[in-house]
Amino acid sequence: MSNKLIGYMETAGLSWMVPMVRLCKGEDAREQATELFNKVGLPLLALLVFLLLWSAGAAQVKTSLGVLPGPVAVWHQATNLYEEHQLQRDKADAFYARQDERNAKKLAANPDAEIKLRDYTGKPTFFDQIGTSLVTVFTGFLLASLIAIPLGVACGLSPKLYGAISPLVQIFKPVSPLAWLPIVTMVVSAVYVSDDPLFQKSFITSAVTVTLCSLWPTLINTAVAVASIDKDWINVGRVIRLSWVTQVFKIAIPASLPMIFTGLRLSLGVGWMVLIAAEMLAQNPGLGKFVWDEFQNGSSDSLGRIMVAVVTIGIIGFLLDWLMTTVQAMLSHQKPAGH
Amino acid sequence: MSVVQMLKRELNLAEKMTESNELQENASVNKSRCFLELSGVSIDFPTRKGPFRALNNVNLKIAKGEFVSIIGHSGCGKSTVMNIVAGLAQATEGGAILNGKEVNEPGPERAVVFQNHALLPWLTCYQNVELAVKTVFKGKKSKKEMREWIEHNLTLVHMDHAIHKYPSEISGGMKQRVGIARALAMEPSVLLMDEPFGALDALTRAHLQDSVMEIQSDLKNTVIMVTHDVDEAVLLSDKIVMMTNGPSATIGEVLEVDLPRPRNRLALASDERYNQLRSEVLTFLYERQRRPEGT
């Protein structure tokens, strides 16, 4: 039971929790305590040192918006942002309650009355913006994966195709998202014209920019993985006379899955980095826009709020990476899931 | 159904199969006992300095139900010979004819047991065999028959206890057993084995050799095995094909092993004829085909 738990924790990258389980199991306390100190104590210590240095250093820097905020000021802003979020939620709830009440009254007076339902148009809070950013990055990432994986498999299977598009990949791979953005914006404005748009233009622009930048790691990894499949596995398929489609789905893709996932993980990381920059410029209501707005706002709280955003961006990026690593560990055929 | 019953059924099946095949054989043009023939097989590999002739003029006739070993020093092209029969490699000159048909591409009637088992690690033992059975017997067997056939073959190699385990969870010998089961499940007319026990420790190897002998005496398969192990070759084969060293390797000598079956490795250890055959192979390999210096 506890061994299974430890197995799950290691798959999920939570190996720092393992000593605690071992302690509860009654294994050698001294050894586990050392382990715990190494895995939990040392990182906590480093964090403490970092906070102290930040606190001391920040006080020395005078900007036009006041002293650079230290950890305490940033924490204060974080709670402020949370309170603002709660306040907006309450306002929105009150708005919808009033609207429902009004409509109910109208209906009571005249059952055929036309009812108007309006969305609340308050300012998006910090937490709404995190949500928007996540939706945007996953849209772009999904789009990139849908293009990159099939194309990568095709390249891996056909060295000629890979040779043909390889120079293009090499050229487009290092292009900064900021260079893509104006082109994407113009194209989206020209092509995506509708009276009742399902998505905002800025959302499409940001998502497409993420796609363009996060395409490459998955594409290259998939192509290399498929091209370097164990020759014996291919021969197995040839001896059985698998059809081409079965060969691809039963052998080529499962065999390259671990490496494809490494590619996807890199792609999602790149996508998240690109997204913030894209949102700043495209004015998509996400974390990037939040940072940009605060910078333009220039109040005495702004620097603190931007720092909250920076830390949040970091933590979310870390969580996304952890998510991908866990999925990858579960899919890797060295450790099949549930064993 | 018990293992014994299954084996009995298998024996009956095999008998019927050989009977019908014999009938066919008598009726067909193929009057000689030759079932598989390699004639004038040569193969060139392209290199920077021009083509490199790995095999030169290999001629070999194999009868139905024969167990043939190909032995030689490493790099002499013995695996290449097998790959040509398998259809995994194409001969530059000459070719292989199986049952009156030329071999051009790989196919399940020439199932291969790979040196490093080549099981797909993301599939369980059962699923590995299933992949082959589903493709080979598509439209010929019902779902239930397929399931029974897969389980039967895994039982045949004594792997019925670990049917639903992943390759990473079983030992090297067990993996090779599953590899053999997968090949047998394709009902091949020739079973090709490329150094099947090369990666195993001596005890496991002996166990598997005994299993293969047992299975072969039941099913009467035609088998070609590539090996570099002299004892293995003498113990298992009806015929040992000894290859000269490359480049331009060819068949140096063919030795008929006339030891009676069933063979017992312990009894044979002190058997005079066995040791004589063994020393003939050793003489060929270590005196007449000494490895060239520096390779």
Image (cartoon, rainbow, N blue to C red):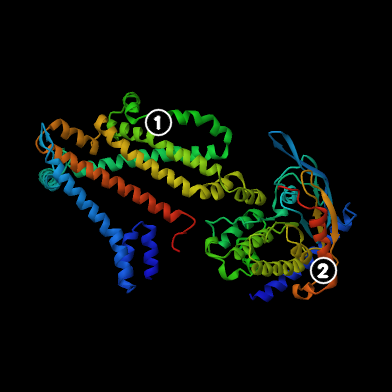
Name the residue rendered at 62%, 58% in the picture. Answer: B117
Q: Is residue A161 above or below residue B6?
A: above
Q: Residue A247 in the image: x percent, y percent?
A: 58, 47
Q: Is residue A18 visible?
A: yes
- Residue at the far front: name it: B293
Asked if one can make out residue B64 in the rendered structure from this viewpoint, the answer is: no
Residue A227: percent from left, percent from top: 55, 42
Rendering quarter of residue B277: bottom right
Q: Name the residue beneath numbered marker 1.
A: A174
The dot on residue B275 is 2
Residue A202 vs B213, above or below: the answer is above
Nearer the viewer's eye, disc 1 or disc 2? 2
Q: Residues within 10 Å of mark 1 (few under 14, many from 20)?
A: few
Q: Compared to B91, does B78 lie above or below?
A: below
Local secondary structure at mark 2: helix
Q: Observer-nearest residue: A143 or A114?
A: A143
* Disc 2 packing (10 Å; few <14; some 14–19; many ≥20): some
Left-right relation of A165 to B138: left
What's under tag 2, amino acid-wise? Asn
Residue B235, disc: none
Give A17 or A144, whichever is nearer the viewer: A17
Position above or below: B261 against B252: below
The residue drawn where x is 35% and y is 35% is A210
Amino acid type of the residue tagged 1 in the rendering: Pro
Tag count in the figure? 2
> Residue A39 occupies which quadrant of the picture?
bottom left
Residue drawn 54% across the image and 56% down it: B121
The picture places residue A141, in percent across and down from the top left corner, at 37, 40
Q: Are marks 1 and 2 in contact (CB under 8 Å)?
A: no
